[in-house]
Image (cartoon, rainbow, N blue to C red):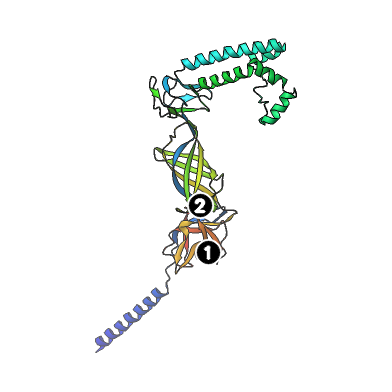
């Protein structure tokens, strides 16, 4: 009996101790462990937008090397890819006949000048004409009104012109100018500095009037015609900077600007044509290359910006987690425009300010008021 009683007492003591121990365990509190997050700062600045489009590279200007008469090509001074200076001869047709006519007309002009000087006794005027200095012919002193011209001649006001006509000087000068024009049609001179390309006729081959022998390209600058959507057009102004890349030129980015902007939207495509201009310092860009253009457009004034990767959408509303005193706080925002990196904040319920850290990594499972530890701060 005593043994049984002792056993019961022992069991009761063990149960009592066990309850006390459990009570002590329940009182102990596990400390909160901060969640590790990465942050970036909200900033104040202009939102930079990028409007992307594509186009084809073209020479800033180009000119066909053409002749206005038929004939055989006797000189092709340059090869493709060679540089030419303004005023240099590029190509020439056979011109023996034109050279003879020019020489004959020049001799006739000299004779007419001599006779004119003999009749007028003005040797100085004859020398001026002979040396191609400024003279009455070059200044086009003739009146286009024939009635007025006739009155001036009859009244003696056009004595010099009358003497020139009687002496044959006017006719000789006109014939000389015509012969010189025909002679010059056999030669083509560069109208600007450039590079020769697309040669289609070689020396000794026959040239048809109006058909290009080759082309002269000005590659000091490159222009690219692109199209943008009509809702993007108002954002773009002449002078906006651009970044241009080419499929054929890997790992190279060229700086350019909007050179001109069309005034009319295409009513079929609802796009606007722009011309992008960039310098071609190394002449590494060739006409015909495919170009990818990124037009840079800034907002009018400074605004509050947050990283795009910081913004979450919950229940149709946008929010960011702003860290204050090591606590993550929900901050609902009203977003505006955005680019690849940032979103414009038009308004916020938690009075978000520039310079405050917002969580960009680790925020997807966070709750409002959670303790956090910043492991990366920009």
Q: Quadrant of residue 108?
A: top right
Q: Residue at x 57, y 14 (%)?
A: 106
Q: Position of residue 10 (x, y in %)?
A: 30, 82
Q: How many marks?
A: 2
Residue most extreme to the bottom:
1
Q: Position of residue 112 (x, y in %)?
A: 63, 13
Q: Residue at x 39, y 40 (%)?
A: 247
Q: Rate crowding at label 2 as few (under 14), some (14 to 19) or many (20 or more) other CA atoms within 10 Å.
A: some
**Residue indicated by mark 1:** 334
Q: Is residue 166 left or right of residue 8?
A: right
Q: Nearer the viewer, residue 2 or 90?
A: 90
Q: Is residue 345 left or right of residue 246?
A: right
Assign a secondary structure to mark 1.
strand
Q: Residue at x 52, y 48 (%)?
A: 296
Q: Position of residue 338 (x, y in %)?
A: 50, 56
Q: Which of marks 1 and 2 precedes in the sequence?
A: 2
Q: Is residue 178 visible?
A: yes
Q: Quadrant of the N terminus?
A: bottom left
Task: State whether residue 95 is above or below residue 258.
Answer: above
Q: What number is the disc on residue 304?
A: none
Q: Is residue 38 visible?
A: no
Marks 2 & 1, CB-CB < 8 Å contact: no
Q: Position of residue 223 (x, y in %)?
A: 49, 39
Assign a secondary structure to mark 2.
loop
Q: Rate crowding at label 1 as few (under 14), some (14 to 19) or many (20 or more) other CA atoms within 10 Å.
A: some
Q: Between marks 2 and 1, how big is the CA–CA gap?
A: 32 Å
Q: Which of labels 2 and 1 is toward the front?
A: 2
Q: Nearer the viewer, residue 103 or 165?
A: 165
Q: Quadrant of residue 200?
A: top left
Q: Nearer the viewer, residue 226 or 283?
A: 226
**Residue indicated by mark 2:** 265
Task: State whether residue 161 is above or below residue 111.
Answer: below
């Amino acid at each position: 009996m005593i043994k049984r009683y002792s056993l019961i007492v022992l069991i009761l003591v063990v149960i009592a101790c066990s309850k006390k121990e459990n009570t002590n365990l329940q009182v102990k509190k596990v400390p909160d462990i901060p969640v590790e997050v990465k942050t970036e700062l909200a900033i104040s600045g202009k939102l930079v937008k990028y409007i992307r489009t594509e186009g084809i590279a073209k020479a800033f200007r180009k000119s066909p090397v053409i002749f206005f008469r038929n004939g055989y090509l006797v000189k092709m001074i340059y090869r493709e890819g060679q540089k030419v200076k303004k005023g240099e001869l590029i190509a020439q047709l056979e011109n023996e006949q034109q050279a003879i006519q020019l020489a004959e007309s020049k001799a006739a002009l000299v004779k007419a000048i001599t006779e004119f000087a003999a009749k007028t006794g003005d040797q100085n005027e004859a020398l001026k004409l002979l040396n191609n200095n400024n003279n009455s012919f070059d200044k086009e002193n003739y009146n286009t009104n024939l009635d007025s011209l006739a009155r001036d001649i009859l009244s003696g006001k056009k004595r010099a012109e009358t003497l020139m006509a009687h002496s044959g000087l006017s006719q000789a000068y006109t014939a000389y100018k015509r012969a010189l024009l025909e002679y010059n049609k056999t030669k083509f001179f560069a109208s600007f500095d450039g590079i020769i390309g697309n040669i289609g006729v070689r020396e000794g081959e026959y040239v048809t009037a109006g058909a290009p022998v080759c082309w002269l390209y000005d590659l000091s600058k490159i222009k690219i015609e692109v199209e943008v959507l009509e809702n993007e057009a108002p954002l773009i102004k002449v002078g906006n900077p651009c970044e241009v890349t080419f499929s054929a030129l890997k790992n190279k980015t060229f700086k350019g600007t909007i050179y001109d902007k069309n005034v009319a939207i295409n009513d079929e495509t609802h796009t606007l044509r722009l011309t992008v201009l960039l310098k071609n310092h190394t002449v590494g860009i060739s006409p015909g290359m495919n170009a990818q253009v990124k037009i840079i457009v800034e907002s009018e004034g400074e605004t509050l910006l947050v990283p795009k990767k910081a913004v979450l959408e919950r229940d149709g509303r946008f929010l960011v987690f702003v860290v204050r005193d090591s606590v993550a706080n929900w901050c609902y925002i009203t977003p505006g425009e955005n680019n690849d990196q940032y979103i414009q904040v038009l308004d916020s319920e938690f009075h978000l300010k520039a310079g405050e850290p917002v969580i960009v990594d680790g925020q997807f499972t966070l709750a409002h008021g959670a303790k956090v530890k910043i492991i990366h701060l920009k």
